[in-house]
Image: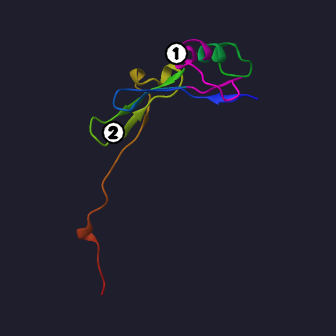
Amino acid sequence: MKDLVADPVYDEYGKQTTVYLPYTEHTEGSFINQSQSINTNIPDFYSETPKISHTLFLTKKPNTEKSPYNRLLSSGAPGYSHQPEQGHTIDNTYTMNGSYASDKIFL
């Protein structure tokens, strides 16, 4: 039986700074050291496993607003061309509800 392992990295405030691609491991529920997972297991899985896309860019980096709300503004995706530094990201927008002054109320 294989476990699906995902290794998000958090900063000192509890925000996700980097999300690594998930991979499978024969652990049967046991603990996996995160540094070993990030430095060895993930690169090995995505470079040696058949029927898996072979890539060296194994992370997704979220870009959050600098406020207590910590809302997601944009996010990268796995692969070189989808990293935030390349300018090709998945963008999120937040808007307010429409003006209530224009609503008509019939009594």
Tell whether position 31 is magenta.
yes
Residue extending farthest left: 101
Residue drawn at (31%, 43%) of the image: 69
Q: Position of residue 70 (x, y in %)?
A: 33, 39
Whichever of callouts 1 and 2 sits on the residue coming sooner in the sequence is 1
Towards the viewer: 48 or 3:
3
Q: How is the image coloured?
A: rainbow
Q: Which residues are magenta?
A: 21-41
Q: Residue at x 29, y 80 (%)?
A: 105
Horizontally, residue 42 falls left or right of residue 91, namely right
Q: Quadrant of residue 22?
A: top right
Numbered label attached to residue 8: none
- Hey, what amino acid is under mark 1? Ser
- Placement of the N terminus among the 4 image quadrants: top right
Label 1 element class: helix
Residue behind mark 2: 70
Can you say whether 15 is above or below 69 in the image? Answer: above
Residue type at the position of mark 2 = Asn
Q: Which mark is residue 35?
A: 1
**Horizontal side of residue 55 vs 65, given as left or right:** right
Please tell me in which quadrant of the rendered image residue 101 appears: bottom left
Alpha carbons under labels 1 and 2: distance apart: 26 Å
Is 100 a magenta residue?
A: no
Name the secondary structure under disc 2.
loop
**42, 84: nearer the viewer:** 42
Residue 81 screen position, x and y as percent: 49, 21
Extreme residue in the right direction: 1
Is residue 107 placed above or below 26 in the rendered structure?
below
